[in-house]
């Protein structure tokens, strides 16, 4: 939720992160992944922003894994569980965060190791038929969010000025 709000705040302020992919009405903000060994499962995180009508993410693919699945993690009674999702709704003019501990993409059956600095190309498929090309950057954590420009400050009434 925090990632989605941060992405929306950036758009309202006119700033855009450097690592963003866009299609006609859909945008992937700060796609990233963590290091993972070949033959295992990696994860993809990002915020999807919809600038158009309601849509839904219905699948994804990458040449670096045997398959990609959408999953959601939830905590109930102190127990973390994960379930596969076949459809992730994306409201009109809305955003959905894929973040550690919540929704995420799983890159299952990695064909090679993912190391810091690597890129994982992927295509996200939507119910509308739209396809969004995304480049997940492998790192040890989420990329830093750029700050929106600040308004000028008046320091003339501060003590000692």
Image: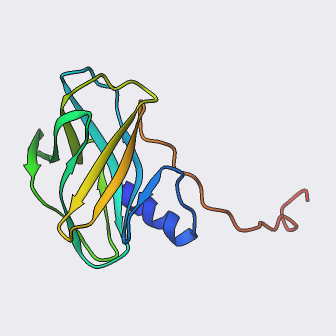
Q: Is residue 99 visible?
A: no
Any part of residue 130 in sight: yes
Is residue 118 left or right of 68 when viewed as pictured? right
Seen at 22% across and 45% down, the residue is 105
Q: Give the residue drawn at x 21%, y 68%.
A: 129
How is the model colour-coded?
rainbow
List x then y, in percent, for residue 66: 15, 34
Q: Position of residue 128 (x, y in %)?
A: 21, 71
Residue toward you, 153 or 131: 131
- The spot of residue 98 in percent (x, y) is 29, 51
Q: Please tell me whether residue 160 is drawn above or below residue 118 in the rendered image.
A: below
Q: Residue at x 38, y 70 (%)?
A: 24
With 17 as the anchor, is 111 left or right in this view? left
82 lies above or below 11:
above
Answer above or below: position of 37 versus 13. Answer: above
Is 102 located above or below residue 39 in the figure?
below
Report the residue that reaches farthest toward the front.
63
Location of residue 48 by image quarter: bottom left
Quarter of the picture containing the N terminus is bottom left
* Residue name at image x 50 percent, y 68 percent: 11
Left or right: 147 as drawn, with respect to 41: right
Question: Residue 90, image x and y in percent?
Answer: 24, 68
Q: Nearer the viewer, residue 159 or 31?
A: 31
How many marks on residues?
A: 0
> Which quadrant of the rendered structure holds the C terminus?
bottom right
């Amino acid at each position: 939720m925090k990632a989605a709000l941060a992405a929306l705040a950036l758009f309202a302020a006119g700033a855009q992160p450097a690592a963003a992919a866009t299609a006609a009405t859909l945008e992937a903000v700060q796609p990233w992944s963590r290091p993972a060994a070949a033959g295992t499962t990696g994860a993809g995180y990002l915020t999807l922003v919809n600038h158009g009508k309601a849509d839904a993410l219905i699948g994804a693919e990458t040449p670096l894994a045997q398959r990609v699945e959408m999953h959601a993690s939830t905590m109930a009674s102190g127990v973390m569980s994960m379930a596969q999702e076949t459809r992730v709704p994306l409201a009109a003019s809305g955003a959905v965060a894929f973040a550690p501990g919540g929704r995420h993409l799983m890159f299952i059956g990695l064909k090679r190791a993912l190391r810091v600095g690597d890129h994982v190309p992927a295509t996200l498929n939507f119910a509308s038929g739209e396809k969004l090309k995304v480049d997940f950057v492998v790192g040890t954590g989420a990329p830093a969010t750029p700050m929106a420009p600040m308004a000028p400050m008046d320091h003339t009434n501060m003590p000692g000025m």
